[in-house]
Image (spheres, rainbow, N blue to C red):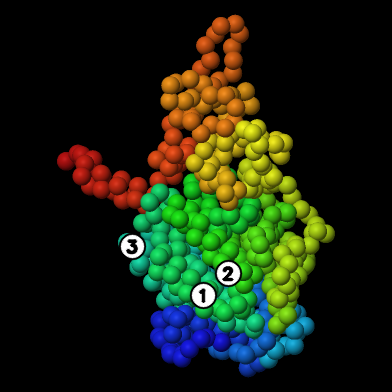
Amino acid sequence: MPCGPVQTIIFGTQSLRKTEHGTSSLRFLGRGSGRANRRGMSYSASHGYRSIAELASQAPNFTLGILGDLHLSPDRQMRLFEEAKDQLVTVLESQQAKLGGGTACQAGLIQLGDVGGYHHQPGSLACFQRCRDWLAGFDLPVALITGNHDLEGLEFKTDALNLAAWQETFQQEHHWRVDVGPAILLGLGTSRFRSNQHSAHEVHVDAEQLAWFRNQLDASQGRPVIVFSHAPILGSGVRSVLDVHVKNRCAWLNHSTNPHVFMELVESHPNIHLWFSGHFHLSHNYADSISVVGRTAFATTGVIGKANRDGFRHSWVLSATPTEYRLQTLDHGTGRLRLDLVQEWGSRAAPAPRPNRTNLLKAPSVVPVMSALPGLQFEGGEALESTAAQWFQIGNGAVLGRKEGLLVEYEAASASPIGVVLTDLEDDHQIRFRGADGGILSGIALDEATSLEVHGPEGDGAAEVAVLHSIPRNAQGTFYQIFQRNKWQLRLAKESATKAHPVATSQ
Protein backbone atom coordinates (compact mmCIF):
# COMPACT_ATOMS: atom_id res chain seq x y z
CA MET A 1 0.00 0.00 0.00
CA PRO A 2 1.23 3.53 -0.66
CA CYS A 3 2.18 5.48 2.41
CA GLY A 4 0.09 8.55 3.15
CA PRO A 5 -2.85 10.09 1.29
CA VAL A 6 -3.28 9.15 -2.35
CA GLN A 7 -3.98 11.63 -5.11
CA THR A 8 -4.52 11.05 -8.80
CA ILE A 9 -2.45 12.71 -11.47
CA ILE A 10 -2.93 12.52 -15.22
CA PHE A 11 -0.05 11.62 -17.51
CA GLY A 12 -0.83 11.28 -21.18
CA THR A 13 -4.09 9.29 -21.35
CA GLN A 14 -3.50 7.27 -18.20
CA SER A 15 -4.21 8.03 -14.57
CA LEU A 16 -1.34 7.34 -12.18
CA ARG A 17 -1.41 7.30 -8.40
CA LYS A 18 0.92 9.46 -6.36
CA THR A 19 1.67 9.38 -2.66
CA GLU A 20 2.94 12.05 -0.31
CA HIS A 21 6.43 10.62 -0.82
CA GLY A 22 6.35 11.57 -4.50
CA THR A 23 5.94 7.98 -5.70
CA SER A 24 4.19 7.00 -8.84
CA SER A 25 2.55 4.10 -7.02
CA LEU A 26 1.46 1.74 -9.76
CA ARG A 27 -0.37 -1.47 -8.88
CA PHE A 28 -0.48 -4.80 -10.64
CA LEU A 29 -3.67 -6.65 -11.40
CA GLY A 30 -4.66 -10.19 -12.21
CA ARG A 31 -5.83 -10.99 -15.73
CA GLY A 32 -9.37 -9.69 -16.11
CA SER A 33 -12.04 -12.35 -16.55
CA GLY A 34 -14.00 -10.15 -18.91
CA ARG A 35 -11.17 -9.56 -21.41
CA ALA A 36 -10.69 -11.55 -24.57
CA ASN A 37 -7.54 -13.65 -24.61
CA ARG A 38 -4.79 -12.19 -26.79
CA ARG A 39 -4.92 -15.29 -29.03
CA GLY A 40 -8.54 -14.48 -29.91
CA MET A 41 -8.29 -10.88 -31.04
CA SER A 42 -5.98 -8.36 -32.66
CA TYR A 43 -4.88 -5.38 -30.57
CA SER A 44 -4.34 -1.92 -32.00
CA ALA A 45 -2.42 1.05 -30.59
CA SER A 46 -5.61 2.38 -28.99
CA HIS A 47 -6.99 -0.92 -27.71
CA GLY A 48 -5.35 -3.65 -25.70
CA TYR A 49 -2.20 -2.15 -24.23
CA ARG A 50 -2.39 -2.41 -20.47
CA SER A 51 -0.12 -0.05 -18.61
CA ILE A 52 0.87 -0.94 -15.10
CA ALA A 53 -1.46 1.70 -13.72
CA GLU A 54 -4.58 0.06 -15.21
CA LEU A 55 -6.09 -1.31 -11.99
CA ALA A 56 -5.24 -1.90 -8.36
CA SER A 57 -5.29 -5.26 -6.58
CA GLN A 58 -4.81 -6.59 -3.08
CA ALA A 59 -3.66 -10.07 -4.18
CA PRO A 60 -1.15 -11.58 -1.72
CA ASN A 61 0.91 -13.37 -4.40
CA PHE A 62 2.46 -12.29 -7.68
CA THR A 63 4.20 -13.72 -10.72
CA LEU A 64 6.24 -11.57 -13.11
CA GLY A 65 7.82 -12.13 -16.48
CA ILE A 66 11.01 -10.05 -16.64
CA LEU A 67 12.19 -9.19 -20.15
CA GLY A 68 15.67 -7.88 -20.81
CA ASP A 69 16.75 -5.68 -23.73
CA LEU A 70 14.02 -6.21 -26.30
CA HIS A 71 15.44 -4.70 -29.52
CA LEU A 72 12.18 -5.59 -31.25
CA SER A 73 12.87 -6.10 -34.94
CA PRO A 74 9.97 -6.23 -37.42
CA ASP A 75 11.77 -8.63 -39.73
CA ARG A 76 12.48 -12.34 -39.84
CA GLN A 77 13.23 -12.26 -36.12
CA MET A 78 9.57 -11.64 -35.31
CA ARG A 79 8.90 -15.35 -35.12
CA LEU A 80 11.32 -15.49 -32.16
CA PHE A 81 9.52 -12.64 -30.41
CA GLU A 82 6.12 -14.22 -30.98
CA GLU A 83 7.41 -17.60 -29.80
CA ALA A 84 8.78 -16.00 -26.63
CA LYS A 85 5.47 -14.20 -26.06
CA ASP A 86 3.53 -17.47 -26.29
CA GLN A 87 5.95 -19.16 -23.89
CA LEU A 88 5.76 -16.36 -21.33
CA VAL A 89 1.98 -16.17 -21.41
CA THR A 90 1.69 -19.93 -20.94
CA VAL A 91 4.19 -19.97 -18.07
CA LEU A 92 2.66 -16.97 -16.29
CA GLU A 93 -0.82 -18.44 -16.60
CA SER A 94 0.49 -21.67 -15.07
CA GLN A 95 2.33 -19.88 -12.27
CA GLN A 96 -0.73 -17.76 -11.53
CA ALA A 97 -2.96 -20.84 -11.34
CA LYS A 98 -0.55 -22.53 -8.92
CA LEU A 99 -0.72 -19.48 -6.66
CA GLY A 100 -4.49 -19.34 -6.47
CA GLY A 101 -5.63 -17.75 -9.72
CA GLY A 102 -6.33 -14.15 -10.70
CA THR A 103 -7.89 -13.07 -7.41
CA ALA A 104 -5.04 -14.46 -5.32
CA CYS A 105 -2.09 -13.84 -7.66
CA GLN A 106 -1.25 -10.80 -9.74
CA ALA A 107 0.50 -11.37 -13.06
CA GLY A 108 2.46 -8.81 -15.02
CA LEU A 109 5.52 -7.96 -17.09
CA ILE A 110 8.61 -5.89 -16.39
CA GLN A 111 10.64 -4.76 -19.40
CA LEU A 112 14.15 -3.44 -18.72
CA GLY A 113 14.55 -0.99 -21.60
CA ASP A 114 16.04 -0.78 -25.11
CA VAL A 115 12.80 -1.63 -26.88
CA GLY A 116 13.82 -0.88 -30.49
CA GLY A 117 15.80 -2.96 -32.97
CA TYR A 118 19.19 -1.59 -33.94
CA HIS A 119 18.18 -1.18 -37.60
CA HIS A 120 14.61 -0.06 -36.94
CA GLN A 121 14.88 3.52 -35.64
CA PRO A 122 15.59 2.87 -31.96
CA GLY A 123 14.38 5.69 -29.76
CA SER A 124 11.84 6.92 -32.34
CA LEU A 125 8.13 7.41 -31.82
CA ALA A 126 7.44 4.70 -34.41
CA CYS A 127 9.70 2.32 -32.47
CA PHE A 128 7.85 3.03 -29.21
CA GLN A 129 4.45 2.51 -30.84
CA ARG A 130 5.58 -0.75 -32.43
CA CYS A 131 6.73 -2.05 -29.08
CA ARG A 132 3.54 -0.92 -27.34
CA ASP A 133 1.44 -2.79 -29.90
CA TRP A 134 3.55 -5.92 -29.45
CA LEU A 135 3.30 -5.75 -25.66
CA ALA A 136 -0.49 -5.35 -25.94
CA GLY A 137 -0.59 -8.91 -27.24
CA PHE A 138 0.31 -10.27 -23.81
CA ASP A 139 -2.95 -8.99 -22.32
CA LEU A 140 -0.99 -8.27 -19.15
CA PRO A 141 -0.08 -5.01 -17.41
CA VAL A 142 3.43 -3.86 -18.26
CA ALA A 143 5.95 -1.63 -16.48
CA LEU A 144 8.97 -0.47 -18.45
CA ILE A 145 12.13 1.46 -17.69
CA THR A 146 14.24 3.41 -20.15
CA GLY A 147 17.51 2.08 -21.51
CA ASN A 148 20.26 3.91 -23.35
CA HIS A 149 18.92 3.13 -26.84
CA ASP A 150 15.47 4.42 -25.92
CA LEU A 151 16.74 8.00 -25.97
CA GLU A 152 18.61 8.05 -29.30
CA GLY A 153 15.66 8.98 -31.51
CA LEU A 154 16.94 11.12 -34.39
CA GLU A 155 13.67 13.04 -34.61
CA PHE A 156 14.13 14.57 -31.15
CA LYS A 157 16.45 17.47 -30.47
CA THR A 158 16.74 16.92 -26.72
CA ASP A 159 16.70 14.09 -24.19
CA ALA A 160 13.65 15.69 -22.54
CA LEU A 161 11.61 15.57 -25.75
CA ASN A 162 12.64 11.99 -26.44
CA LEU A 163 11.78 10.94 -22.89
CA ALA A 164 8.40 12.69 -23.06
CA ALA A 165 7.50 10.74 -26.21
CA TRP A 166 8.44 7.47 -24.46
CA GLN A 167 6.34 8.41 -21.40
CA GLU A 168 3.34 9.41 -23.52
CA THR A 169 3.48 6.19 -25.55
CA PHE A 170 3.79 3.81 -22.62
CA GLN A 171 1.53 5.87 -20.31
CA GLN A 172 3.94 5.92 -17.39
CA GLU A 173 6.93 7.63 -15.84
CA HIS A 174 10.41 6.25 -16.58
CA HIS A 175 10.87 5.49 -12.88
CA TRP A 176 8.18 4.16 -10.61
CA ARG A 177 7.11 2.34 -7.49
CA VAL A 178 4.80 -0.68 -7.55
CA ASP A 179 3.34 -2.18 -4.39
CA VAL A 180 2.58 -5.82 -5.15
CA GLY A 181 1.87 -8.58 -2.64
CA PRO A 182 4.50 -8.49 0.08
CA ALA A 183 7.03 -6.47 -1.93
CA ILE A 184 7.81 -2.98 -3.17
CA LEU A 185 9.09 -2.84 -6.75
CA LEU A 186 11.21 0.15 -7.75
CA GLY A 187 12.12 0.93 -11.35
CA LEU A 188 15.01 3.25 -12.27
CA GLY A 189 15.28 4.63 -15.80
CA THR A 190 17.99 6.51 -17.66
CA SER A 191 17.23 10.13 -18.45
CA ARG A 192 20.02 11.27 -20.74
CA PHE A 193 21.80 10.26 -23.94
CA ARG A 194 22.71 13.40 -25.88
CA SER A 195 24.03 15.13 -22.76
CA ASN A 196 26.31 12.36 -21.48
CA GLN A 197 29.87 13.61 -21.16
CA HIS A 198 31.56 10.71 -22.92
CA SER A 199 29.70 7.63 -24.15
CA ALA A 200 26.12 8.43 -25.07
CA HIS A 201 25.28 4.91 -23.93
CA GLU A 202 26.09 5.45 -20.26
CA VAL A 203 22.93 4.66 -18.29
CA HIS A 204 22.40 7.64 -16.01
CA VAL A 205 20.08 8.16 -13.04
CA ASP A 206 19.88 11.90 -12.44
CA ALA A 207 20.03 13.62 -9.05
CA GLU A 208 16.27 14.11 -8.78
CA GLN A 209 15.54 10.46 -9.48
CA LEU A 210 18.31 9.36 -7.13
CA ALA A 211 16.81 11.44 -4.32
CA TRP A 212 13.41 9.87 -5.09
CA PHE A 213 14.98 6.39 -4.94
CA ARG A 214 16.62 7.13 -1.61
CA ASN A 215 13.31 8.39 -0.22
CA GLN A 216 11.51 5.24 -1.35
CA LEU A 217 14.06 3.04 0.36
CA ASP A 218 13.95 5.07 3.56
CA ALA A 219 10.14 4.85 3.58
CA SER A 220 10.03 1.11 2.88
CA GLN A 221 10.11 0.31 6.62
CA GLY A 222 11.74 -3.06 6.16
CA ARG A 223 9.33 -4.39 3.53
CA PRO A 224 10.99 -6.50 0.82
CA VAL A 225 12.24 -4.32 -2.04
CA ILE A 226 13.01 -5.43 -5.61
CA VAL A 227 14.84 -3.01 -7.92
CA PHE A 228 14.92 -2.92 -11.73
CA SER A 229 17.44 -0.91 -13.76
CA HIS A 230 18.73 -1.14 -17.30
CA ALA A 231 22.41 -1.37 -16.35
CA PRO A 232 23.68 -3.12 -13.22
CA ILE A 233 25.43 -1.29 -10.39
CA LEU A 234 29.12 -1.10 -9.61
CA GLY A 235 30.11 -3.79 -7.11
CA SER A 236 27.22 -6.10 -7.90
CA GLY A 237 29.59 -8.75 -9.26
CA VAL A 238 27.52 -9.71 -12.30
CA ARG A 239 29.40 -10.71 -15.42
CA SER A 240 30.35 -7.82 -17.69
CA VAL A 241 31.53 -7.43 -21.29
CA LEU A 242 34.98 -5.91 -21.22
CA ASP A 243 35.55 -4.87 -24.82
CA VAL A 244 32.16 -3.17 -25.17
CA HIS A 245 30.59 -1.72 -22.04
CA VAL A 246 33.63 -1.59 -19.76
CA LYS A 247 35.86 -0.27 -22.53
CA ASN A 248 33.39 2.53 -23.31
CA ARG A 249 32.70 3.19 -19.60
CA CYS A 250 28.99 2.54 -19.90
CA ALA A 251 28.81 -0.75 -17.98
CA TRP A 252 27.40 0.43 -14.64
CA LEU A 253 24.71 2.85 -13.56
CA ASN A 254 26.25 6.36 -13.52
CA HIS A 255 29.55 4.78 -14.54
CA SER A 256 31.43 8.08 -14.83
CA THR A 257 29.53 10.04 -12.16
CA ASN A 258 29.53 8.59 -8.64
CA PRO A 259 28.60 4.97 -9.39
CA HIS A 260 29.27 3.96 -5.75
CA VAL A 261 26.10 5.54 -4.40
CA PHE A 262 23.92 2.61 -5.42
CA MET A 263 25.90 -0.05 -3.56
CA GLU A 264 26.04 2.28 -0.56
CA LEU A 265 22.23 2.32 -0.60
CA VAL A 266 22.12 -1.47 -0.89
CA GLU A 267 24.42 -1.82 2.11
CA SER A 268 22.30 0.57 4.19
CA HIS A 269 19.01 -1.08 3.16
CA PRO A 270 19.31 -4.86 3.64
CA ASN A 271 15.63 -5.25 2.71
CA ILE A 272 16.66 -4.90 -0.95
CA HIS A 273 16.30 -8.58 -1.81
CA LEU A 274 16.68 -8.58 -5.60
CA TRP A 275 18.12 -6.25 -8.25
CA PHE A 276 17.46 -7.06 -11.92
CA SER A 277 19.35 -5.51 -14.85
CA GLY A 278 19.95 -6.08 -18.55
CA HIS A 279 22.27 -4.12 -20.89
CA PHE A 280 24.89 -6.85 -21.46
CA HIS A 281 22.81 -9.23 -23.62
CA LEU A 282 24.21 -12.22 -21.73
CA SER A 283 22.25 -15.34 -20.88
CA HIS A 284 21.63 -16.78 -17.43
CA ASN A 285 24.07 -19.64 -18.01
CA TYR A 286 27.00 -18.30 -16.00
CA ALA A 287 27.88 -18.92 -12.40
CA ASP A 288 27.74 -15.13 -11.90
CA SER A 289 24.54 -14.48 -13.84
CA ILE A 290 23.21 -14.28 -10.29
CA SER A 291 25.69 -12.62 -7.95
CA VAL A 292 25.13 -12.19 -4.22
CA VAL A 293 26.35 -9.28 -2.10
CA GLY A 294 25.21 -9.43 1.51
CA ARG A 295 21.55 -10.44 1.39
CA THR A 296 20.92 -9.02 -2.08
CA ALA A 297 20.86 -11.16 -5.22
CA PHE A 298 21.78 -9.33 -8.43
CA ALA A 299 20.45 -10.97 -11.59
CA THR A 300 21.48 -10.14 -15.14
CA THR A 301 18.67 -10.59 -17.66
CA GLY A 302 19.00 -12.15 -21.10
CA VAL A 303 17.29 -11.29 -24.39
CA ILE A 304 14.60 -13.06 -26.40
CA GLY A 305 15.79 -12.20 -29.92
CA LYS A 306 19.00 -12.57 -31.88
CA ALA A 307 20.77 -9.77 -29.99
CA ASN A 308 22.28 -12.30 -27.56
CA ARG A 309 26.04 -12.72 -27.20
CA ASP A 310 26.23 -16.42 -26.46
CA GLY A 311 23.50 -18.24 -28.38
CA PHE A 312 20.94 -18.47 -25.56
CA ARG A 313 17.63 -16.57 -25.28
CA HIS A 314 16.43 -16.16 -21.70
CA SER A 315 13.91 -14.30 -19.54
CA TRP A 316 13.23 -14.43 -15.80
CA VAL A 317 10.04 -15.62 -14.15
CA LEU A 318 9.74 -14.36 -10.59
CA SER A 319 6.95 -15.76 -8.39
CA ALA A 320 6.32 -14.78 -4.80
CA THR A 321 4.10 -15.44 -1.81
CA PRO A 322 4.05 -13.61 1.52
CA THR A 323 6.79 -15.98 2.76
CA GLU A 324 9.21 -16.57 -0.15
CA TYR A 325 10.20 -15.88 -3.74
CA ARG A 326 11.22 -18.29 -6.51
CA LEU A 327 13.34 -17.17 -9.45
CA GLN A 328 13.31 -19.28 -12.61
CA THR A 329 14.95 -18.99 -16.03
CA LEU A 330 12.68 -19.41 -19.03
CA ASP A 331 14.81 -20.77 -21.88
CA HIS A 332 13.15 -19.58 -25.07
CA GLY A 333 15.17 -22.05 -27.12
CA THR A 334 13.57 -25.04 -25.38
CA GLY A 335 10.54 -23.51 -23.70
CA ARG A 336 11.65 -25.01 -20.39
CA LEU A 337 11.82 -23.49 -16.94
CA ARG A 338 14.86 -23.88 -14.67
CA LEU A 339 14.70 -23.09 -10.97
CA ASP A 340 17.72 -20.95 -10.06
CA LEU A 341 16.97 -19.44 -6.66
CA VAL A 342 14.52 -19.88 -3.77
CA GLN A 343 14.65 -17.59 -0.75
CA GLU A 344 12.42 -16.75 2.19
CA TRP A 345 11.76 -13.04 2.61
CA GLY A 346 12.51 -13.23 6.31
CA SER A 347 15.75 -15.17 6.02
CA ARG A 348 18.88 -13.49 7.35
CA ALA A 349 21.08 -15.87 5.34
CA ALA A 350 22.60 -14.84 2.03
CA PRO A 351 20.67 -16.05 -1.03
CA ALA A 352 22.20 -19.21 -2.48
CA PRO A 353 21.70 -19.79 -6.22
CA ARG A 354 21.08 -23.49 -6.82
CA PRO A 355 24.34 -25.44 -7.32
CA ASN A 356 22.74 -27.88 -9.75
CA ARG A 357 22.12 -25.23 -12.40
CA THR A 358 22.78 -26.74 -15.82
CA ASN A 359 24.42 -25.49 -19.01
CA LEU A 360 26.76 -23.18 -17.11
CA LEU A 361 29.23 -21.43 -19.39
CA LYS A 362 32.71 -20.16 -18.68
CA ALA A 363 32.54 -17.32 -21.18
CA PRO A 364 30.92 -16.52 -24.51
CA SER A 365 33.12 -17.37 -27.46
CA VAL A 366 32.22 -14.22 -29.37
CA VAL A 367 33.51 -11.55 -26.98
CA PRO A 368 36.04 -11.39 -24.15
CA VAL A 369 34.19 -11.50 -20.86
CA MET A 370 35.67 -11.33 -17.38
CA SER A 371 33.91 -10.97 -14.07
CA ALA A 372 35.21 -9.19 -10.99
CA LEU A 373 38.65 -10.13 -9.72
CA PRO A 374 38.12 -13.71 -8.54
CA GLY A 375 39.93 -14.19 -5.26
CA LEU A 376 42.70 -11.73 -6.12
CA GLN A 377 44.70 -10.64 -3.08
CA PHE A 378 48.02 -8.91 -2.55
CA GLU A 379 50.58 -9.81 0.07
CA GLY A 380 53.86 -8.01 0.39
CA GLY A 381 53.65 -6.63 -3.11
CA GLU A 382 53.13 -10.04 -4.68
CA ALA A 383 49.94 -11.27 -6.31
CA LEU A 384 48.55 -14.54 -5.02
CA GLU A 385 47.79 -17.21 -7.61
CA SER A 386 44.19 -16.67 -8.73
CA THR A 387 43.65 -16.76 -12.50
CA ALA A 388 45.68 -16.89 -15.68
CA ALA A 389 45.67 -13.09 -15.80
CA GLN A 390 48.64 -10.84 -15.03
CA TRP A 391 47.96 -8.20 -12.36
CA PHE A 392 49.49 -4.81 -11.49
CA GLN A 393 48.68 -2.78 -8.38
CA ILE A 394 48.88 0.86 -9.55
CA GLY A 395 47.69 2.79 -6.50
CA ASN A 396 44.74 5.14 -6.12
CA GLY A 397 42.56 2.13 -5.38
CA ALA A 398 43.07 0.59 -8.82
CA VAL A 399 44.45 -2.67 -10.20
CA LEU A 400 45.25 -3.51 -13.82
CA GLY A 401 44.54 -6.99 -15.14
CA ARG A 402 45.89 -8.36 -18.39
CA LYS A 403 43.87 -11.07 -20.07
CA GLU A 404 42.69 -12.08 -23.55
CA GLY A 405 44.56 -9.24 -25.29
CA LEU A 406 43.10 -6.57 -23.03
CA LEU A 407 44.57 -4.50 -20.23
CA VAL A 408 41.63 -3.76 -17.96
CA GLU A 409 41.42 -1.42 -15.00
CA TYR A 410 39.60 -2.60 -11.87
CA GLU A 411 38.52 -0.72 -8.81
CA ALA A 412 39.99 -2.71 -5.94
CA ALA A 413 37.36 -1.80 -3.35
CA SER A 414 34.43 -3.12 -5.38
CA ALA A 415 36.46 -5.67 -7.37
CA SER A 416 34.79 -4.31 -10.49
CA PRO A 417 36.16 -3.51 -13.96
CA ILE A 418 35.79 0.22 -14.59
CA GLY A 419 37.74 0.85 -17.80
CA VAL A 420 40.16 -0.45 -20.40
CA VAL A 421 43.71 0.75 -21.03
CA LEU A 422 44.67 -1.26 -24.13
CA THR A 423 42.84 -3.62 -26.48
CA ASP A 424 45.55 -4.93 -28.81
CA LEU A 425 48.08 -6.73 -26.60
CA GLU A 426 49.91 -9.67 -28.15
CA ASP A 427 51.26 -12.58 -26.13
CA ASP A 428 54.87 -11.42 -26.58
CA HIS A 429 54.21 -7.79 -25.61
CA GLN A 430 55.70 -6.68 -22.30
CA ILE A 431 54.14 -4.13 -19.93
CA ARG A 432 56.55 -1.82 -18.13
CA PHE A 433 56.04 1.11 -15.74
CA ARG A 434 58.24 4.19 -15.39
CA GLY A 435 58.69 6.41 -12.35
CA ALA A 436 59.11 10.18 -12.19
CA ASP A 437 62.85 9.82 -12.80
CA GLY A 438 62.26 7.89 -16.01
CA GLY A 439 63.50 4.60 -14.62
CA ILE A 440 61.71 1.27 -15.05
CA LEU A 441 59.92 0.13 -11.88
CA SER A 442 59.91 -3.50 -10.79
CA GLY A 443 57.35 -5.61 -8.93
CA ILE A 444 53.59 -5.19 -8.99
CA ALA A 445 53.21 -2.47 -6.33
CA LEU A 446 53.42 0.48 -8.70
CA ASP A 447 52.01 3.45 -6.81
CA GLU A 448 54.93 5.63 -7.92
CA ALA A 449 54.53 4.90 -11.63
CA THR A 450 53.87 7.98 -13.76
CA SER A 451 53.50 6.20 -17.08
CA LEU A 452 52.86 2.78 -18.59
CA GLU A 453 54.66 1.41 -21.62
CA VAL A 454 54.07 -1.55 -23.90
CA HIS A 455 57.28 -2.99 -25.29
CA GLY A 456 57.49 -5.18 -28.35
CA PRO A 457 59.22 -8.58 -28.32
CA GLU A 458 62.86 -8.56 -27.37
CA GLY A 459 65.16 -8.86 -30.36
CA ASP A 460 68.40 -10.79 -30.73
CA GLY A 461 71.57 -9.41 -29.27
CA ALA A 462 71.59 -5.74 -28.35
CA ALA A 463 68.73 -4.71 -30.62
CA GLU A 464 66.63 -1.96 -28.99
CA VAL A 465 63.14 -2.98 -27.92
CA ALA A 466 60.37 -0.99 -29.60
CA VAL A 467 58.05 1.04 -27.39
CA LEU A 468 54.61 0.43 -28.91
CA HIS A 469 52.58 2.51 -26.45
CA SER A 470 53.40 5.11 -23.80
CA ILE A 471 50.46 6.11 -21.61
CA PRO A 472 50.62 8.67 -18.79
CA ARG A 473 48.25 8.60 -15.85
CA ASN A 474 44.85 10.13 -16.58
CA ALA A 475 43.15 12.97 -14.70
CA GLN A 476 41.84 10.47 -12.12
CA GLY A 477 45.37 9.26 -11.38
CA THR A 478 44.94 5.86 -13.03
CA PHE A 479 45.35 4.61 -16.63
CA TYR A 480 42.00 3.80 -18.23
CA GLN A 481 41.43 5.51 -21.57
CA ILE A 482 38.40 7.20 -23.13
CA PHE A 483 37.63 5.23 -26.29
CA GLN A 484 34.18 6.55 -27.12
CA ARG A 485 33.03 10.15 -27.32
CA ASN A 486 29.35 11.02 -27.31
CA LYS A 487 28.18 10.10 -30.81
CA TRP A 488 25.30 12.57 -30.73
CA GLN A 489 27.63 15.45 -29.95
CA LEU A 490 30.03 14.27 -32.65
CA ARG A 491 27.20 14.26 -35.18
CA LEU A 492 26.17 17.80 -34.23
CA ALA A 493 29.78 18.97 -34.51
CA LYS A 494 30.06 17.41 -37.96
CA GLU A 495 26.82 19.07 -39.09
CA SER A 496 28.00 22.41 -37.74
CA ALA A 497 31.33 22.10 -39.55
CA THR A 498 29.54 21.23 -42.79
CA LYS A 499 27.32 24.32 -42.51
CA ALA A 500 30.32 26.52 -41.75
CA HIS A 501 32.32 25.20 -44.70
CA PRO A 502 29.86 24.01 -47.37
CA VAL A 503 31.27 22.13 -50.31
CA ALA A 504 31.46 24.36 -53.37
CA THR A 505 29.08 23.37 -56.14
CA SER A 506 29.49 24.05 -59.84
CA GLN A 507 27.22 26.62 -61.49
Image quarter hosting the C terminus:
top left
Mark 3 touches mark 1? (CB < 8 Å): no
At a point 61% along the width and 66% down the height, the residue shown is 275
Image mark count: 3
Q: CA distance from mark 2 to mark 1?
A: 8 Å
- Residue receiving disc 2: 269
Q: Position of residue 313 (x, y in %)?
A: 68, 60
Amino acid under disc 3: Thr
Q: Earlier in the sequence, mark 3 or mark 1?
A: 3
Q: Earlier in the sequence, mark 2 or mark 3?
A: 3
Query: Is residue 5 something one can see in this rendering?
Result: yes
Q: CA distance from mark 2 to mark 3?
A: 35 Å
- Residue 353 lies in quadrant: bottom right
Instruction: Give the mark toward the camera: 3 or 1.
Output: 1
The secondary structure type at the circle numbered 1 is: helix
Image quarter hosting the N terminus:
bottom right
Mark 2 touches mark 1? (CB < 8 Å): yes
Q: Horizontally, is 60 left or right of 241 in the view?
A: right
Q: CA distance from mark 3 to mark 1?
A: 33 Å
Judge by depth and name the residue closer to the eye, 158 or 354.
Answer: 354
Q: Position of residue 433 (x, y in %)?
A: 51, 26
- Residue receiving disc 3: 158
- Residue 257 lies in quadrant: bottom left
Q: Earlier in the sequence, mark 2 or mark 1?
A: 1
Q: Horizontally, is 97 left or right of 144 in the view?
A: right
Q: Horizontally, is 145 left or right of 351 in the view?
A: left
Q: Residues within 10 Å of mark 3 (few under 14, many from 20)?
A: some
Judge by depth and name the residue closer to the eye, 209 or 395.
Answer: 395
Query: Is residue 334 something one can see in this rendering?
Result: no
Q: Is residue 368 above or below residue 10?
A: above
Q: Is residue 310 above or below residue 63?
A: above
